[in-house]
Amino acid sequence: MKTKDWFTDWFNTSYYHTLYKERNDDEAQLFMKNITSFLNLPKTTHILDLPCGKGRHSVFLNSLGYKVTGGDLAENSIKSAKEFENDTLNFKVHDMRQTFNNKYDAVFNLFTSFGYFEDDKEDILILDNIKQGLNKGGFFVFDFLNAEKVKLNLVIKETKTVDNITFNIKREIKNGFIFKHISFFADGENHTFTEQVKYLDLEKMTTFFEKVGFTITNVFGNYHLNEYNAKTSDRLIIIAK
């Protein structure tokens, strides 16, 4: 039986972490160093990493000297992340659609962790929660795929073998969403999952941000914080306050 939200199941499986285990930690760390230094965040800054997955960004941000809270809907991910907890690093299960109990000096939404929902209202609600959860003068860092480049270079079919599991991946763009269909055989059975994120370009994100009262201060196109180019940039990184 499929649950309403595709990510509730998929992000909670071990297969999700297997498929993406080769994610580049060096790249993620470079981005965290560059962005905290660009924003000139003092070490007293309390950062919310949302959603945080198993906590790879949170752990690194904490090692840079920041107080960090990581929130994620996937209970298994939070369970793994909790092993890294210390006095200035903690993790909790949190749905982005719920308001926060605390206020933060910065909120980071990293690695295309947005645009999961059919209705724009839910995406806007999440942004509003983030806006309300920021202290005065706080920063929001939004890191998303560059939809225009994805469209221009769409890899329709791909096969990836990780830990003896062969993942068959098919991609398509339709009805305003970028779909990634993943099928594989593991542990004696066939599995099928679909990731979907909304086709959100800079124009659409700008309207979303304006709706909740965010002011965009910078737009970058990669983790080196180079200028954004709609056709060639790898990422769409927006800084707002």
Image (tube, rainbow, N blue to C red):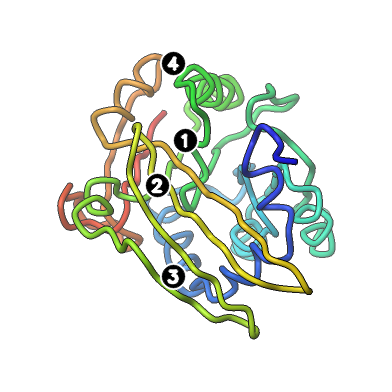
Q: Which mark is residue 212?
A: 4
Q: Residue at x 77, y 59 (%)?
A: 81
Q: Amino acid at mark 3?
A: Glu
Circle 4 — which element?
loop
Circle 1 — which element?
loop
The furthest residue to the front: 189
Quadrant of res 129: top right
The furthest residue to the bottom: 164
Find disc 1 in the rendering and name its residue.
115
Query: N-terminal of the two: label 3 or label 1?
Result: 3
Query: N-terminal of the two: label 3 or label 2?
Result: 3
Q: Nearer the viewer, residue 197 or 226?
A: 197
Q: Amino acid at mark 1?
A: Gly
Find disc 3 in the rendering and name its residue.
27
Compared across the picture, whether 66 is left or right of 239 comes to right
Compared across the picture, whether 23 is left or right of 172 comes to right
| Mark 4 → mark 2, Cα distance in angstroms | 18 Å
Q: Residue at x 32, y 61 (%)?
A: 156
Query: N-terminal of the two: label 4 or label 1?
Result: 1
Residue 114, placed above or below residue 192:
above
Circle 3 — which element?
helix
Q: Amino acid at mark 4?
A: Val
Residue 124, placed above or below residue 50:
above
Circle 2 — which element?
strand
Quadrant into which the C terminus falls? top left
Query: Which circle, 3 or 1, is nearer the viewer?
Result: 1
Residue 29: x and y, percent?
50, 67
| Mark 3 → mark 2, Cα distance in angstroms | 14 Å
Q: Amino acid at mark 2?
A: Phe
Q: Which mark is residue 144?
A: 2
